[in-house]
Amino acid sequence: MKRSSTWMMVSALTLVMGCGGAPEDVPPDAPEAQEDVLFSQTILRERPDGTMSQETTFITREEQLAQIEARDALVRSLGARVTQQDLDDLLIDSGCAGSSLWLFDQTSRTGNQLCLYKQAGADAAWLNLGTVIRKFTNPYFVTWANAVRSLYSGVHPGALQSCTATSCSTLIYQSFNAYQLLNTISYGTQLNWAYLYTP
């Protein structure tokens, strides 16, 4: 009786540790399934009192491409017929679609994404990108400062700038118009502030 109990214990331990062999329903030469790479998508909104709300989710590249295509289609449909109501409708969107600015940490609108909403009715808005977390790289949190490599602007034109606590550079910046695509950002490693204004 004691011998059979020991045998059962060794068998159970072997199976738990993964030495029970390959699962029977998977052929031994089947390629390993590759997991989809997930990118963070952070949505930052300026509230009427000047504070910011932030939410982060994770999306696949396929989902990101679908969102980009939806925004492209919206821009094409607006054409020259953009009205204030169109702009207001875009700003009410609950996701990234109607945001004022999409920033990406890789070229050609790929990688992690930051969606900025300027407060409706405000003339201008500034954001220190060093205050927004982009990703976690053990053991550090990495911010969006000096990380922007491409962008897709929305309703508002603006600029990315290189700023210190007291001033912003007049030489190191990247300006953009409403609904402009920039697949490569000049000075991307030095831009740490985003500026949006109402045209």
Image (cartoon, rainbow, N blue to C red):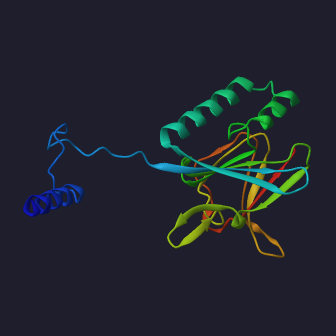
Relative to 6, 168 lies left or right:
right
Percent coordinates x, y for residue 114 in the rendering = 65, 52
Which one is in front, 55 or 98? 55
Q: Is residue 3 above or below residue 164?
A: above
Above or below residue 135? Residue 164 is below
At a point 19% along the width and 44% down the height, the residue shown is 23
Residue shown at 74% from the left, 26% from the top: 78
Q: Is residue 85 above or below residue 27?
A: above
The foreground one among 196 and 99 is 99
Give x and y (percent) for residue 93: 74, 35
Say which of 48 and 175 sits in front: 48
Residue 79 in the image: state x and y as whole percent: 74, 26
> Where is 173 relative to 104, above or below?
below
Q: Which quadrant: the C terminus? A: top right
Q: Residue at x 77, y 74 (%)?
A: 164
Query: How many discs appear?
Result: 0
- Percent across and percent down for residue 147 are 60, 62
Q: Quadrant of the N terminus?
A: bottom left
